[in-house]
Amino acid sequence: MENNTNKNLILRNLTGKRTSSVPIWLMRQAGRYLPEYRKIRQAKGSFLDLCYSPKLAAEITLQPVRRFGFDAAILFSDILVIPDALGQRVSFEEGLGPVLEPLTPQEPLLVDRVDRLKNDSLHKLDAVYETIERVAAEKKDDCALIGFAGGPWTVATYMVEGGSSRDFLKIRRWATCNPTSFGSLINTLTDATIAHLDAQINAGVEVLQIFESHAGVLDCFGFDQWVIKPTRRIVDTIKGKHPHIPIIGFPRGAAAQIPVFILETKVDAVSLDQSVPLNWASSEISDSFPVQGNLDPIYLLGDPAELSVHVSRVLSAFANRPFVFNLGHGVNKETDPKSVERLVEIVRDYNHRSPKET
Ligand code: 1CP
């Protein structure tokens, strides 16, 4: 069962081993800042169609790995394939982002659809699992393949708000005024997420990341109920079946709740957003616990000398723990690929003050 742990720097760090060379991948490393992505995207037209085209999706997954030599490939897909597979209409519109037919508390919940999905073993998402099989067959052993899903709360925000939101008022009102019916939506999404992640592992992913991008809009009671508890159920169930697959949690905006998130969800690693102060992370998160992050992606749009200073700050802060270099959020579409190249060089050139392999 130790099969994968030696091949890849990311797998080693995520299983608690410090390596002298810091591994790197970036959230949204595939996408619109890459001309080779834009070319395929233009030819295909619809973003969701691209997610369901295994050959093209596999190619897009591998584009940033070929160009920059990242230590991981992240499956090219989206967190919103879950509502799409559950039968909620989803589209991606130029300039607007995702658009969904919003779900309301008055509407019958999607439970029956989820039951059907379970029986159908997530049929609509078969194309996603085929993408994984293709990437797994093509990638090198020293590159980890990361699968993912949105956290149930974050996916629910899009389902209830009908897209991106500024104030998340509809979902917060539903969760507060009718926690029982909202709880069954979260439960349904948790079941679907577990089935989706399980199928991704069976198809060949070696690491999972759970993107809870909108965790930061909840107070500590909401965070416990709608983020910690569902995540804990996902982690427990997946670990029961696949104990050796590391799971990274990304509770974006969770701030001072990160330690309790780590403790209670039992994720293997935490991805920090850029608002987390480096010295706070060092003092509040046990130094044996794997951390990922957290350079502000804005530095990729700025002065190269500044970039170097800020990358070094992050590297120094996490020099003595299992660590995977990443951004605090996704690569911005305005980013010049040359900046990403420079970033990878800075990380590769970094010399640890006390190199130590465990
Ligand atoms: O127009 C285009 O070409 C589509 C742009 C795009 C891309 C490239 C979207 C639309 N999604 C993706 C891919 C994607 N999304 C990946 C693939 C792998 C990679 O990282 O390279 C992943 C992991 C996601 C995850 C995702 N989708 C998240 C979680 C991470 C985050 O950014 O916080 C979220 C919130 C989404 C929803 C989504 N998908 C796309 C958009 C424009 C949005 C909305 C973002 C928002 O509300 O601000």
Image (tube, rainbow, N blue to C red):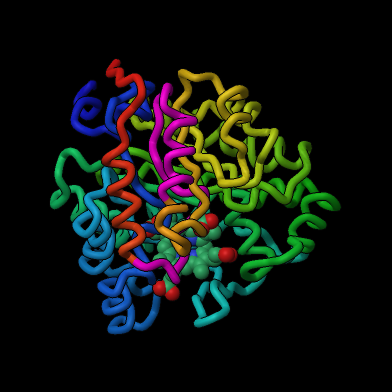
Q: Position of residue 318 (x, y in %)?
A: 46, 29
Residue 345 sits above or below residue 97 on the image: above
Q: Quadrant of residue 333?
A: bottom left
Q: Is residue 152 visible?
A: yes
Above or below 38: residue 299: above
Q: Position of residue 259 (x, y in %)?
A: 63, 27
Please provide percent x and percent y for residue 148. Answer: 42, 48
Q: Residue at x 63, y 67 (%)?
A: 164
Pinpoint residue 185: horizontal percent, then vertical percent.
65, 52
Quadrant (top left/top right/bottom left/bottom right) for the N terminus = top left
Query: Is residue 285 positioned above or below 179 on the image?
Result: above
Front residue (pair 298, 227): 298
Whether residue 84 is visible: no
- The front one of 332 and 245 is 332
Instruction: Indicate whether residue 312 is drawn in magenta.
Output: yes
| Magenta-drawn segment | 308-336
Q: Say whether residue 297 is left or right of residue 44.
A: right
At x 27%, y 32%, the residue is: 9
| Residue at position x 49%, y 30% in the image | 317
